[in-house]
């Protein structure tokens, strides 16, 4: 580890003003950031801890939506009665992230800001057509995740919450890496008032939707409707865990399982 200053921010304004220094970095649960620092892959001059900012924590209902604060831990999303009632698929997804240690430290804000290609929350954020709130603006899910570990966040921008529309009919199916539990492929299917959405994690550089499946499912919401829809292997991840061909196959299998579970 390189040397750095540690600052426990007491308010969002406090964190934002410290973040004006381009060499400073936010820390949420540290689940990704601390190993990165230990490997000397990052050299921030200051770590700004968001843990003591009360407004960033918690889960509330806002009419037809559930709003989850950026510093809310995965375990709290998994246990939340509000989430279980309004969007059960989201509670279940949170309960299958990593192991108990990861779920009790990792946060939804850290997960989506990091945008690991194999992370689970991006599939739910896009699949449910959520809105990401920051200290500066609101960003629609389809615009938030922009590439490998890349998001629409600008320098100095802090995720404050994610607003999920309530969608009872949704399901997430993950073919997980047995060691880390990250998604080799994860598919989130949701029947929203604005139509069916299919969002895929793990298969590509970044979460993506499958319009052909969405159209087919809008006409006939059954696994059979998508059984012949294969996604192109071009551009899919190929690594020691799975080839692009295998991942393409898994997208179809996981999507059909998710539709079956929804129905
Ligand atoms: C062993 C292991 C297994 C895992 N398995 C899974 C899995 O199965 N599925 C899955 O989805 N994830 C998995 N994860 C990731 C985990 O869920 C965490 O969410 C992720 O590591 C981010 O951690 P964190 O919330 O502690 O953020 P940190 O590590 O503290 O921060 C991550 C990055 O986000 C930035 N950041 C943090 N908060 C904000 C904010 N509010 N606004 C803007 N930027 C911010 C930080 O500056 C940093 O760059 C795993 C992690 C580990 C270590």
Image: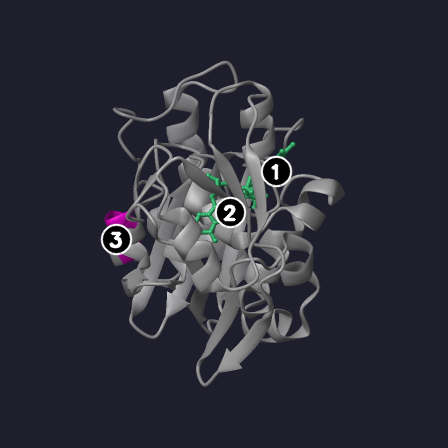
- Mark 1 or 3: in front is 1
**Residue 71 image offset from top left, x and y in percent:** 57, 57
Q: In which quarter of the image is residue 5?
A: top right
- Estimate the spatial distance between the alpha carbons at disc 2 and disc 3, rounded to whole Å: 18 Å
Mark positioned earlier in the residue sequence (2 or 1): 1
**Residue 23 image offset from top left, x and y in percent:** 39, 35
Mark 1 CB within 8 Å of ligand 1: yes
Give me the residue at 34% from left, 58% from top: 197
**Residue 124 image offset from top left, x and y in percent:** 45, 55
Q: Callout 3: helix, strand or loop? A: helix
Mark 2 CB within 8 Å of ligand 1: yes
Q: Callout 1: helix, strand or loop? A: loop
Q: On the picture, is 58 further left or further right than 23?
A: right
- Estimate the spatial distance between the alpha carbons at disc 2 and disc 1, rounded to whole Å: 9 Å
Where is mark 3, residue-wise?
Answer: 143
Q: Give the range drawn in magenta.
A: 209-214
Q: Does the magenta stretch include residue 71?
A: no
Where is mark 2, residue-wise?
Answer: 110
- The dot on residue 31 is 1
- The dot on residue 62 is none
Can residue 256 be seen here? no
Q: Is residue 210 magenta?
A: yes
């Amino acid at each position: 580890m390189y040397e750095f200053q540690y600052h426990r921010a007491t308010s969002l304004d406090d964190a934002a003003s410290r973040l004006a220094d381009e060499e400073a970095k936010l820390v949420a649960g540290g689940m990704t950031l601390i190993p990165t620092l230990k490997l000397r892959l990052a050299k921030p001059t200051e770590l700004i801890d968001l843990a003591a900012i009360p407004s960033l924590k918690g889960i509330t209902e806002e009419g037809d939506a559930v709003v989850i604060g950026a510093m809310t831990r995965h375990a709290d999303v998994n246990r939340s009665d509000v989430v279980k009632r309004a969007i059960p698929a989201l509670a279940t997804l949170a309960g299958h992230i990593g192991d108990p240690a990861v779920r009790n430290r990792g946060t939804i804000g850290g997960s989506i800001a990091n945008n690991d290609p194999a992370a689970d929350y991006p599939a739910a954020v896009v699949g449910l057509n959520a809105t990401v709130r920051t200290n500066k603006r609101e960003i629609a899910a389809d615009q938030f995740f922009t590439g490998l570990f890349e998001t629409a966040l600008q320098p100095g921008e802090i995720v404050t919450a994610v607003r999920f529309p309530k969608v009872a009919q949704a399901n997430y199916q993950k073919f997980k890496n047995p060691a880390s539990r990250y998604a080799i492929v994860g598919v989130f299917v949701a029947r929203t008032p604005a139509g069916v959405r299919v969002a895929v994690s793990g298969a590509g550089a970044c979460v993506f939707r499958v319009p052909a499946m969405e159209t087919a499912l809008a006409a006939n919401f059954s696994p059979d409707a998508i059984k012949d829809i294969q996604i192109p292997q071009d551009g899919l991840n190929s690594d020691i865990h799975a080839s692009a061909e295998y991942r393409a196959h898994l997208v179809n299998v996981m999507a059909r399982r998710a539709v079956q579970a929804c129905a």
